[in-house]
């Protein structure tokens, strides 16, 4: 049986850390869909804590100010890092002058986790990897330098590294949600269900989107097939969400013929809306979909019951 996270008092403390002026707060604002405020933000003063719920599970986000005096205080008082389950460490890839200090601070945080006997999930975000510079020689040199420095850290063996930019907000949003699901008890079950369902219906891509339009889980055969799901699914989900907010009739499902067939399904779990998007290149898959969809939705609801 999958553990019931909420009844066990499970909650997630998620830390965002890094040097000052590294883009950490703008990244968080992107998560909150407040990109228009990015150009007006001020440096974080010590720690700002915000919270939300993901399928009923409390998530607390700690935005830890990166100024030197704050960093020194955090490291001399390890309790700041206690109970951490997920760390996003942000490195400004455009500021090579700060690489050494950033790696040293990151190493000190990892050592603090060792001292506290904690093993949180650790994600390094190579931030400000903006589209207009991603193919420049200088940018790729910076990426190489950072990765080489990270590889030398003794306590950084199982970290994941991603490139992010506020100009690609969906990447940031989806990455955040998917990493949370990896540490939620039973969260893996939703991913397993999607993967098996895609295989059973011989589809090419499947995606589960939450009411906030963030991707919860996905499975796919090729990146192109997933891209079709992402683009079409996001727009269809936006349409359904806006119709619901206007108290208009919301389509329960939509089928679209394109380079294959796209199927959109509106799912209501308790009082929360979800959206399922399938893409298949064979019409036979649609017949299988109709047959096995009811059982899949039942299994999905059961998995969510254990989580929330």
Image (cartoon, rainbow, N blue to C red):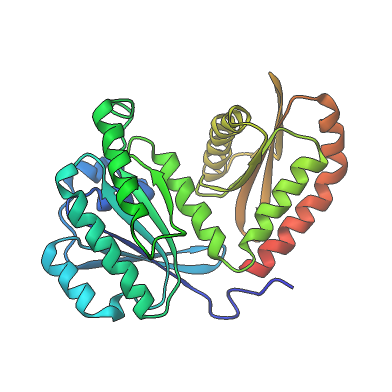
Q: Is residue 66 left or right of residue 115?
A: left
In the picture, the quarter occupied by the N terminus is bottom right
**In-image side of 119 versus 90 (left or right):** right
Front position in the image: 145 or 37: 145
Does the image show residue 307?
yes
**Residue at horizontal 78%, vertical 41%?**
199
Give the x, y percent position of residue 15.
35, 64
Q: Residue at x 43, y 76 (%)?
A: 118
Residue 29 appearing in the image: no
Q: Name, please, the residue furthest toward the left.
A: 69
Tell me where residue 242 appears, x and y as whole percent.
52, 39
Q: Is residue 274 above or below residue 203?
A: below
Closer to the camera in the image, 107 or 129: 107
The answer to whether residue 156 is left or right of residue 244 is left
Q: Is residue 140 above or below residue 16?
A: above
Residue sticking out furthest to the top = 259
Residue 8 in the figure: left or right of residue 158: right
Percent position of residue 145, x then y: 28, 43
The quadrant in which residue 282 appears is top right
- Say if 124 sits above or below 86 in the image: above
Write the residue at 16% across / 64% down.
45
| Residue placed most toward the observer, 71 or 274 | 71
The image position of residue 89, as x and y in percent, is 33, 57
């Amino acid at each position: 049986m999958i553990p019931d996270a909420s009844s066990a008092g499970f909650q997630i403390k998620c830390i965002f850390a890094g040097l000052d002026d590294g883009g950490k707060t703008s990244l968080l604002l992107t998560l909150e869909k407040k990109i228009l405020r990015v150009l007006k933000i001020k440096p974080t003063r010590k720690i700002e804590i915000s919270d939300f719920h993901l399928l009923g599970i409390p998530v607390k986000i700690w935005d830890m100010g990166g100024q030197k005096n704050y960093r020194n205080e955090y490291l001399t008082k390890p309790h700041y890092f206690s109970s951490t389950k997920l760390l996003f460490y942000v490195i400004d890839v455009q500021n090579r002058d700060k690489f050494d200090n950033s790696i040293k601070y990151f190493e000190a945080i990892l050592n603090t986790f060792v001292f506290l006997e904690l093993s949180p999930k650790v994600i390094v975000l190579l931030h400000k990897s903006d589209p207009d510079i991603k193919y420049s020689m200088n940018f790729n040199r910076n990426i190489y330098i950072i990765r080489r420095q990270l590889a030398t850290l003794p306590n950084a063996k199982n970290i994941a590294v991603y490139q992010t930019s506020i100009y690609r907000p969906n990447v940031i949003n989806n990455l955040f949600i998917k990493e949370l699901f990896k540490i939620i008890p039973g969260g893996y079950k939703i991913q397993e269900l999607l993967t098996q369902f895609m295989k059973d219906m011989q589809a090419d891509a499947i995606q589960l989107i939450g009411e906030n339009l963030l991707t919860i889980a996905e499975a796919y055969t090729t990146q192109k097939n997933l891209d079709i799901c992402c683009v079409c699914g996001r727009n269809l989900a936006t349409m359904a969400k806006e119709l619901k907010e206007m108290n208009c009739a919301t389509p329960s499902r939509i089928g679209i013929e394109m380079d294959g067939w796209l199927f959109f399904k509106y799912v209501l779990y308790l009082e929360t809306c979800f959206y399922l998007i399938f893409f298949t290149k064979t019409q036979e898959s649609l017949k299988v979909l109709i047959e096995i969809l009811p059982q899949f939705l039942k299994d999905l609801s059961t998995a969510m019951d254990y989580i929330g």
